[in-house]
Amino acid sequence: MLMTIKRRPTTRTLPGWAIHVLQEAGAIRECEEHGWMQARADPHARERAFDIARLYPPADVSPHAAETAVRDALGSIGDTCPECAPDEQDWR
């Protein structure tokens, strides 16, 4: 039986590209249970993501703009999953 591997769709927005770069570098991961993105505390992975952004920006995007997009995407992602976080009642 012939099986094909489905390719991922091409990222069409700069923020989407930045999230993809962060995932590939290992700077963020997806919550296995809920699917929220979580920042990892790995400075080397973050530097790899910035290096990728500077060296291989998308077409028609400057290296500085690509690096800024990665920085903005990383800043918008928390280090915990909102659905996994304990309730306020548990803290009392």
Image: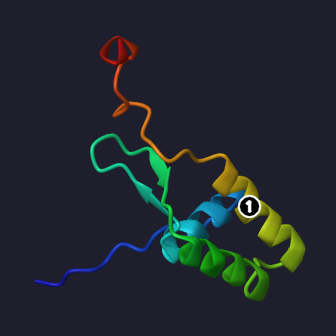
| Residue 45 point in image, percent of width and height | 55, 75
Does 1 sit left or right of 44 as displayed? Answer: left
Callout 1 secondary element: helix
Relative to 78, residue 24 above or below: below
Quadrant in which the N terminus appears: bottom left
Residue found at x 65% / y 56%: 74
Relative to 86, residue 58 above or below: below
Quarter of the image for residue 29 reads bottom left
Residue found at x 73% / y 86%: 56
Camera-nearest residue between 40 and 72 = 40
Crowdedness of circle 1 by 10 Å Cα count: few (<14), some, many (20+)? some
**Residue of label 1:** 71
The reply to whether residue 60 is in sight is no
Quadrant in which the C terminus appears: top left
Does 58 sit left or right of 29 as displayed? Answer: right
Residue found at x 42% / y 39%: 81
Q: How many numbered marks appear?
A: 1
In the displayed orientation, state which residue is furthest to the bottom. 55
| Residue 33 point in image, percent of width and height | 27, 43
In the displayed orientation, state which residue is furthest to the left. 1
| Residue 18 point in image, percent of width and height | 66, 64
| Residue 36 point in image, percent of width and height | 44, 44
The reply to whether residue 41 is in sight is yes
In the displayed orientation, state which residue is furthest to the front. 92
Camera-nearest residue between 23 and 7 = 23
Residue found at x 38% / y 45%: 35
Camera-nearest residue between 50 and 11 = 50
Relative to 9, residue 63 above or below: below
Does 20 sit left or right of 51 as displayed? Answer: left
Does 68 sit left or right of 36 as displayed? Answer: right
Colour scheme used in the picture?
A: rainbow
Callout 1 amino acid:
Arg
